[in-house]
Amino acid sequence: MPKNSKVTQREHSSEHVTESVADLLAHQEPVDYKRSVLNVTGEAWDKQKEGDEELDAENRPAWNSKLQYILAQIGYSVGLGNVWRFPYLCQKNGGGAYLVPYLVLLIIIGLPLFFLELAVGQRIRRGSIGVWNYICPRLGGIGYASCLVCFFVGLYYNVIIGWSIFYFFKSFQYPLPWSDCPIVKNGSVAVVETECERSSATTYFWYRETLDISNSISESGGLNWKMTLCLLVAWSLVGLAMIKGIQSSGKVMYFSSLFPYLVLVCFLVRGLLLRGAVDGIMHMFTPKLDKMLDPQVWREAATQVFFALGLGFGGVIAFSSYNKQDNNCHFDATLVSFINFFTSVLATLVVFAVLGFKANIMNEKCVVENAEKILGYLNTNVLSHDLIPPHVNFSHLTAKDYNEMYRVIMTVKEGHFKELGLDACLLEDELNKSVQGTGLAFIAFTEAMTHFPASPFWSVMFFLMLINLGLGSMIGTMSGITTPIIDTFKVRKEVFTVGCCIFAFVVGLIFVQRSGNYFVTMFDDYSATLPLTVVVILENIAVAWIYGTKKFMQELTEMLGFRPYQFYYYAWKYVSPICMAVLMTASIIQLGVSPPGYSAWIREEAAEKFLFYPTWAMAILISLIILASLPLPLVFILRQFHLVSDGSNALSVTYKKGRMMKDISNLEDNDETRFILSKVPSETPSPMPTHRSYLGPGSNSPMEMSSAPNGRYGSGYLLASTPESEL
């Protein structure tokens, strides 16, 4: 409230405030400030509701320890993207050079916005809906949009956990079922499955044995019952982890957050001992500096930073809302952000070490196959023996010897070289093959593991790691739904959690039909990117420009016990909104330039083929974006034109344990007297000397203004004994 307002002037004067709220409301007996709840909105007093509010305000669940909370935030932010998205972007966008734009954007966008979400959640102690209703009721749609995006992401994210569960149970056999192509009988003759022979054993197992995928999104093909059962198991795990709130999910985090690091370290040690691992790591860290000038690299780095920290989903706010008021959330933001970064680097080291090993295996296979072709040409006199260097031994042919022989033949047979069908077999070409997402986890990595000694053990460890990474992120995503809904609508936690999981499983059946992988791609590409970017921009604007950066910094100073760096002031007010606006614009342009489509697996060709989405799929795609963004303008319009109450017209005074809290949102300076004393300033009642001023228990100081997360959207009065910024 402005310092020159009438109410503030009255508060800081030396005279007793005889027309205080307590004077106006008290009639016969002094107020029992510890227990009494006075409601002057004209609504009937509801004892049960009062009890619920007190329980919510004073007995909100809390983390058992700081370690549990940090592990929860790490488990949420460190997910599957760190393992299969970041290494791909690193490989695609200049190797070690990509780390520079990523780290710069992490500092100027990721860290400030992550700190902002942690701070508002901890200060207001509500989920995303309550937080943004408190800060700016007209932008209250931010919380509802976050819930919808969390729901969309949770639908397909849990399908990926289901796939990992399937591979996990399939790993308990030797040899691994994706090691070799299956043999089928054609009459009395046993032949290799054609689709597998034309692709690879791991590719065949993924597309045919696991997904039994159809040729296009238009061909449903019915439910894949193996994947349906795995999806049911996945949602059961999430439901069990979430059913008791943070009391149950917090305990799960001890394992789901720490186990992936154990596996990554084990894989790194094992990977470094593999032949060719150093080639992969050197390829990763070899910087291509020209890539740093490419705007596309910076756009992809910003998008990865944005999603790696889980900004806008509401999970960060939900977790921090269970913290104590004096928790150092600035330290938490810095710690989690850089742990996330170093986890991505660790995962990239593991991936490139294993892919370096795989590249060497594939390169040796290429050399053997092409050497056999050359021997055939030598035996049929297509090639002369004089073309073969004398030191070359076909029994122990190295990649170096083959490359020398290849260059000689290409030079001599320049006019007819293409007809020979020889491949260069360069290790660099194998390392440059960009693989991401499911292609990395379920095809490239599984193929590499088939060459490991004790391959079933490593396969079990790898997919158990993926399950835990996914589960940690799913708990945070589901908290982004359950916490704000339970806070806002006071539904029973257990009932809502179970109902939400059942509903999500039923809707998620679309992802486990034979064309389900194409819907996963659609949701992954379009359901979250644009809506979340808009959500985070509005979050930033709500705090920095509507609530006020100076006010927010002052309240953080009182909450934390120290003033955050001035860097955050400028980041929140100018740098982050501009960067996010540029990112949103680039995302819109990217959507317009890149035709919406997907990679379909064509069974007859045993190869992937890019297809455009049909009209009905485009309608679903556009509906996803609109539906996720719809709460933003809808809530704004409803509250701007007073079609629904935003809490600003209700006066609800609550006395609890030395605090008096009032529901007073979006008041104009000249409306303060009207709300506290009467309807309009001119109707201010005369002093009532028959009643003493209400100054709080044992206090002779005037009442101070502050903010409190009580009432509908939270602004309130506190007693002089309570710091102004305390909630």
Image (spheres, grey):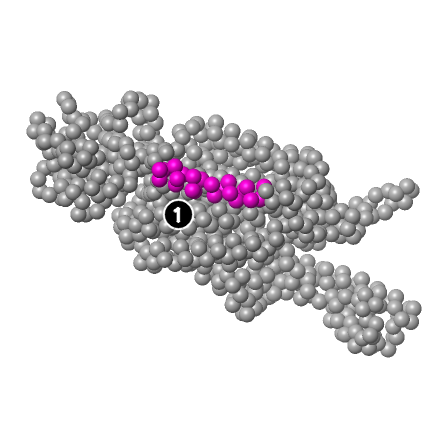
Q: Is residue 661 left or right of residue 683?
A: right
Could you tell me residue 562's position as x and y percent? Answer: 28, 52
The residue closer to the viewer here, 522 or 58, is: 522
Quadrant of the image occupied by residue 30:
top left
The residue at the point 91 percent across, 68 percent down is: 379
- Which quarter of the rendered picture does the C terminus lie within? top left
Question: Which is nearer the eye, 460 or 27?
Answer: 27
Q: Would you say residue 458 is visible in this rendering?
A: no
Residue extent of the magenta highlight = 620-641
Q: Crowdedness of circle 1 by 10 Å Cα count: few (<14), some, many (20+)?
A: many
Q: Position of residue 677 (x, y in %)?
A: 17, 33
Residue 625 forms part of the magenta stretch:
yes
Query: Is residue 296 in view?
Result: yes
Q: Amino acid at mark 1?
A: Glu
Q: Quadrant of the N terminus?
A: top left
Residue at 78% from the left image edge and 72% from the top image edge: 406
At a point 87% along the width and 75% down the height, the residue shown is 385
Kindly state the secondary structure of the residue where label 1 is placed: helix
Read off the residue under disc 1: 539
Residue 50, located in which quarter of the rendered image? top left
Percent position (x, y) of residue 300?
53, 57
Residue 567 sits above or below residue 511 on the image: below
Tell me the quarter of the picture where residue 714 sits.
top left
* x, y percent for residue 454: 68, 49
Q: Is residue 701 left or right of residue 275?
A: left
Magenta-highlighted stretch: main secondary structure?
helix
Residue drawn 55% across the image and 50% down it: 81
Q: Is residue 656 left or right of residue 120?
A: left
Magenta stretch contains residue 33: no
Number of numbered markers: 1
Front position in the image: 481 or 339: 481
Residue 88 vertical position relative to residue 181 in the rendered view, above or below: below
